[in-house]
Image (cartoon, grey):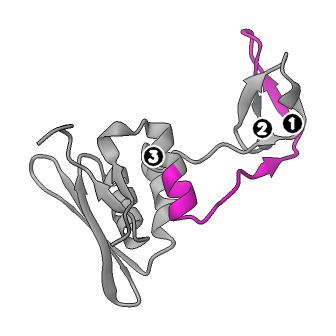
Amino acid sequence: MSGEVIKWAALLPDQRDALVHEKVMGHKERAICRSEQRYGYDDGDWECGECGATGQWNNAMVGDHYQPIPHYTQSLDAAWLVMEHFDELVLVVHVKPRWHCTLHKDEAPSGNATMKTPQEAICVAALRAAGITVDESEKTDG
Ligand SMILES: [Zn+2]
């Protein structure tokens, strides 16, 4: 076991997404988007028409900008990107509802998790498959 233990409940959703982006998807650095296609909003914000990044007109990053990290742990659409890194995914919903996900690679179970939403179950199972120890308990103390 590596010494790294992730306290799931202590992370903000965006921090969870960033963790999956690096540890599971293998992106060490943020990708740069060079598109100049912009949708403007009345409140002074812009949204990139290509990658969906958002910003404000009055800051310097209107040209090249970081592509947003997909919301793997918040959206089932984005969680599906994680699934493509594995050979087989088994997703079971229990009555509570709790979602149980088992991920397989090379015909062996390589990670599993039981979480409140299917997207979180997929992401935590994938992190465990990547060798990360995730403590998903919701209480901060035992
Ligand atoms: Zn963009």
Q: Residue at (71%, 50%) from the top-left corner?
A: 30
In the depicted view, which residue is nearer to us: 56 or 35?
A: 56
Alpha carbon of mark 2 to alpha carbon of mark 1: how far?
5 Å
Alpha carbon of mark 1 to alpha carbon of mark 3: how far?
29 Å
Q: Disc 1 vs disc 3: Cβ atoms closer than 8 Å?
A: no
Alpha carbon of mark 2 to alpha carbon of mark 3: how far?
25 Å
Structural crowding at the residue carrying mark 3, measured as other residues with C-alpha within 10 Å and reported as few (<14), some (14–19) or many (≥20): many
Reading the chain from its start, which is encountered first: label 2 or label 3? 3
Q: Nearer the viewer, mark 2 or mark 3?
A: 3
Q: Is mark 2 within 8 Å of ligand 1?
A: yes
Q: Is mark 1 within 8 Å of ligand 1?
A: yes
In the depicted view, which residue is nearer to us: 110 or 90?
A: 110
- Residue 32 is situated, as x and y percent measured from the top left of the image, at 80, 49
Give SS at disc 3: helix
- Residue 41 is situated, as x and y percent measured from the top left of the image, at 74, 16
Residue 37, disc = 1
Which residues are the magenta region? Answer: 19-46
- Residue 82 is situated, as x and y percent measured from the top left of the image, at 48, 63
- Residue 136 is situated, as x and y percent measured from the top left of the image, at 25, 50
Residue 16, disc = 3
Q: Residue at (11%, 42%) from the top-left corner?
A: 142
Residue 49, disc = 2
| Residue 40 within the segment the image draws in magenta | yes
Reading the chain from its start, which is encountered first: label 1 or label 3? 3
Tell whether 117 sits left or right of 139: right
Quadrant of the displayed image that contains ligand 1:
top right
Farthest front residue? 3
Using the rendered image of the protein, determine whether residue 102 is visible from the camera's viewpoint.
no
Q: Residue at (51%, 71%) from the top-left corner?
A: 84
Give SS at disc 2: loop
Q: Disc 2 vs disc 1: Cβ atoms closer than 8 Å?
A: yes
Quadrant position of residue 131: bottom left
